[in-house]
Image: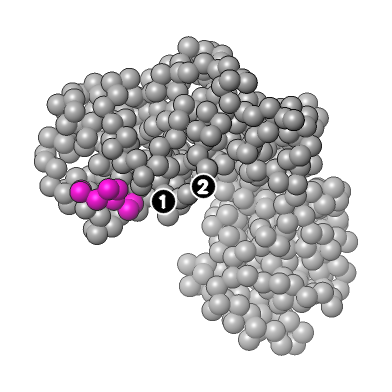
């Protein structure tokens, strides 16, 4: 019989409660909690986490395993070898349900040792509603819950300036720290909490914006029996994630010392502005995904792994990143090249099966946000359209026909865009030039008329015809 995962069977250090974490999901447990566990192990960070469950849910709490769980980190390491690194994480002390234990939640604010607030309440979590009231137990939105918490702390410590917190949201929205601060101040005004509280929020608390990056694949349902047999214990909160991770924090440089970053090898960066890192991730990682999907799918491939195993597609992606995307970005080229290598390594992760069809959701909008800025910059800087990005756009137009060489293609996008392409289906065979002009003229999508870019329409049309007549792979294999 397997052992249960608890402190009786696995003695653990109970660290002082210095971190409040909004969110109990897979991502935070394989990202923040995993990193805190390493910091506790390798340095004197000495910080325990109290998890606040921000939603009304009856799912089991981490307390059932005394906060213990296994994070299984798998992927390709720096030497190019597949690795699997399980870690028994012990940084979580307890979990509180804000809906069922509201008084306990507020009591956490009275802890003089508390320093940090981390969160991941999904992209929709950082929101504002004038319907939220101070006396709600709890208010609905995450910023309202946090405002209530911070006001309780302000009152308990009589507005002491040294009792402010470091707030580090991990939600996937631009400048999440600034948005969180904006909404907290809005609630302070809505609830008439006073100028002194507003000044304390602004002057005594540190709001950091972040960029987070790690694929977390969650509970390994298909492998759990084998993994539990390998580890010798049962674990209902086991979480799996890729080897690569990146945590960029926009904040003051003293956070380097606060996080002991000179004493441990963690991929955490404290920066003045996350924008260049956001551009790097969107352009290189997400841009490579968006470019690869229509090209590889029309070539008969169905997953990222299959695509990267194909030498023609793999070479296409590498050339696109190194010859066209990286020259348009503002960070140091060597740093960008290393990130691109990491991306290729991540795409080759044997532990993750990433379906191209799943990534194809809203591909037109994704092309606009992830590749179009680089296409425009490259065309202006070098006086010609970039051939690999043009290829991706031509393949995308073919993809949105919904059929290619007798193969049906399932499409998922805004209805008005799909209807537009449905009306253009006859043009694929009768007037491809007009089809391309129509696509490039979608100013409601692109926010400009792409027909105005010298040579772009002709280049897209030429590749559209070559793809249809010669095939995808035989065409792109001819690129240098």
Foreground of the two, 329 or 182: 182
Q: Main secondary structure of the magenta part?
A: loop
Above-or-below relation of 21 to 379: above
Res 394 → quadrant? bottom right
Q: x and y percent of residue 462 in the render?
A: 76, 70
Image location of residue 185, percent across then percent down: 23, 44
Residue at the spot 68% in from the left edge and 27% down from the top edge? 3
Q: Secondary structure at mark 1?
A: loop
Q: Residue furthest front?
A: 1
Corner quadrant of residue 196? top left
Residue that mark 1 sits on: 56
Where residue 59 appears, as percent x and y from the top left, is 51, 47
Residue 107 position by quadrant: top left
Q: Which residue is mark 2?
A: 59
Task: Please report the bounds of the magenta region as a residue range.
Answer: 134-141
Query: For residue 138: magenta?
Result: yes
Left or right of 252 in this view: 371:
right
Of the 4 image quadrants, the one containing the N terminus is top right
Horizontal placement of 229 versus 173: left or right? right
Along the viewing direction, whichever of 337 and 69 lies nearer the viewer: 69
- Taking the spot 22% from the left edge, 35% from the top edge, the residue there is 152
Q: CA distance from mark 2 to mark 1?
A: 9 Å
């Amino acid at each position: 019989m397997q052992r249960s995962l608890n402190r009786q069977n696995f003695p653990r250090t109970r660290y002082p409660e210095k971190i409040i974490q909004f969110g109990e999901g897979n991502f935070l447990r394989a990202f923040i909690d995993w990193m805190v566990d390493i910091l506790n192990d390798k340095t004197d960070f000495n910080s325990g986490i109290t998890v606040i469950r921000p939603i009304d849910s009856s799912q089991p709490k981490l307390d059932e395993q005394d906060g213990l769980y296994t994070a299984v980190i798998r992927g390709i390491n720096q030497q190019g070898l597949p690795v699997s690194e399980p870690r028994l994480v012990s940084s979580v002390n307890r979990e509180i349900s804000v809906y069922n234990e509201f008084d306990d939640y507020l009591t956490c604010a009275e802890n003089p040792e508390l320093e940090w607030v981390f969160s991941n309440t999904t992209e929709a979590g950082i929101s504002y509603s004038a319907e939220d009231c101070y006396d709600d137990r709890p208010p609905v939105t995450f910023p309202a819950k946090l405002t209530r918490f911070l006001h309780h702390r302000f009152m308990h410590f009589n507005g002491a300036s040294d009792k402010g917190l470091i707030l580090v949201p991990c939600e996937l929205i631009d400048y999440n720290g600034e948005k969180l601060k904006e909404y907290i101040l809005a609630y302070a005004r809505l609830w008439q909490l006073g100028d002194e509280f507003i000044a304390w929020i602004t002057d005594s608390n540190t709001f950091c914006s972040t960029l987070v990056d790690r694929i977390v694949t969650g509970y390994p349902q298909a492998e759990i029996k084998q993994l539990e047999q390998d580890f010798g214990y049962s674990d209902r909160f086991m979480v799996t994630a890729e080897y690569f991770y990146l945590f960029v924090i926009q904040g003051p440089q003293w956070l380097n010392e606060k996080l002991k970053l000179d004493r441990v090898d963690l991929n955490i960066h404290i920066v003045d502005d996350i924008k260049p890192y956001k551009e790097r991730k969107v352009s290189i990682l997400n841009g490579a995904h968006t470019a690869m999907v229509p090209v590889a799918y029309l070539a008969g491939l169905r997953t990222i792994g299959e695509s990267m195993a194909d030498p023609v597609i793999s070479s296409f992606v590498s050339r696109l990143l190194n010859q066209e995307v990286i020259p348009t970005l503002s960070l140091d080229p060597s740093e960008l090249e290393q990130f691109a290598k990491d991306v290729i390594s991540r795409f080759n992760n044997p532990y993750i099966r990433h379906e191209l069809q799943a990534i194809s959701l809203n591909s037109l909008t994704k092309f606009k946000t992830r590749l179009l800025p680089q296409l425009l910059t490259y065309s202006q800087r070098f006086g010609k359209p970039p051939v690999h990005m043009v290829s991706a756009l031509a393949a995308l137009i073919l993809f949105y026909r919904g059929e290619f060489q007798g193969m049906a293609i399932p499409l998922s996008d805004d209805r008005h865009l799909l209807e537009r392409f449905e009306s253009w289906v006859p043009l694929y065979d009768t007037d491809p030039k007009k089809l391309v002009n129509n696509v490039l003229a979608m100013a409601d999508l692109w926010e400009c008329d792409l027909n105005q870019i010298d040579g772009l329409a002709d280049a897209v049309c030429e590749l559209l015809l070559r793809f249809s007549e010669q095939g995808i792979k035989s065409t792109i294999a001819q690129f240098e």
